[in-house]
Image (cartoon, rainbow, N blue to C red):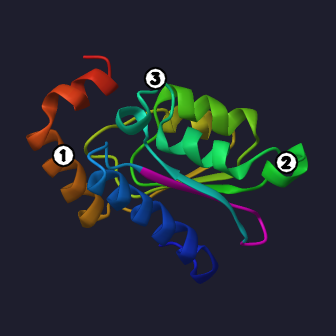
Amino acid sequence: MVSFDAEAGYREAVSEAKAGADEGGIPIGACLVSRDGKILGKGRNMRVQSKSAILHAEMSALENTGRLPASDYEGATMFTSLSPCDMCTGAMILYKVKRCVIAENKTFVGGEEYLKQRGIDVVVLDDPECKALMKNFISEKPDIWNEDIAL
């Protein structure tokens, strides 16, 4: 399970996912936490709201983190409500994120194995709340889900 210090980052990622759902978007949230436990940035999937091709939750969290020295990203933990896609996986590798904590990966499995191959710790929590968020979204808006995952 997530350590006490990391709990705030995890809660923020889930909160962002819920906010995205409330806005009519894809309910995926993320939060980047520094190695010393400080929240650097958080975000949610904004593809629907912003009509963006790339604003997935992890990308949004990085964007909201702002421009920092590379050393500030290195060793950080990315909390995400859903397994990261290839684009978000690449961004985590690029910024030398140390750990990726995933709320659920039953709905979608992204680049978890590649993260592990690149030395990044991957933790999957199997969170029922996040599974339910995604299940409801896919049931209500399958066209948007299929668009996002390129089906």
Image x and y of residue 48, in percent = 35, 34
Query: Which of the 4 image quadrants contains residue 94?
Result: top right
Q: Residue at x 58, y 38 (%)?
A: 59
Q: Which of 142 and 107 is in front in this view?
A: 142
Question: Any mark on residue 12, and which?
Answer: none
Task: Report the mark closest to the observer, 1 or 3.
Answer: 3
Q: Mark 1 points at which residue?
A: 137
Q: Is residue 45 magenta?
A: no
Q: Mark 3 points at which residue?
A: 53
**Disc 2 to disc 1, how far (Cα)?**
34 Å
Above or below: residue 56 compared with residue 134 = above
**Disc 2 to disc 3, how far (Cα)?**
24 Å
Residue type, label 1: Phe
Question: Any mark on residue 68, and which?
Answer: 2
Q: Nearer the viewer, residue 123 or 102?
A: 102
Image x and y of residue 11, in percent = 47, 71
Above or below: residue 76 compared with residue 5 = above
Residue type, label 2: Leu
Q: What stretch is highlighted in magenta?
A: 29-37
Assign a secondary structure to mark 2: loop
Taking 55 as reference, is 19 left or right? Answer: left
Q: Can residue 66 be seen in this view?
A: yes
**Disc 1 to disc 3, how far (Cα)?**
19 Å
> Crowdedness of circle 3 by 10 Å Cα count: few (<14), some, many (20+)?
few
Q: Is residue 33 magenta?
A: yes
Furthest residue in direction top, as rendered = 151
Residue type, label 3: Ala
> Crowdedness of circle 2 by 10 Å Cα count: few (<14), some, many (20+)?
few
Mark 1–mark 3 contact, CB under 8 Å?
no
Q: Residue at x 56, y 68 (%)?
A: 9
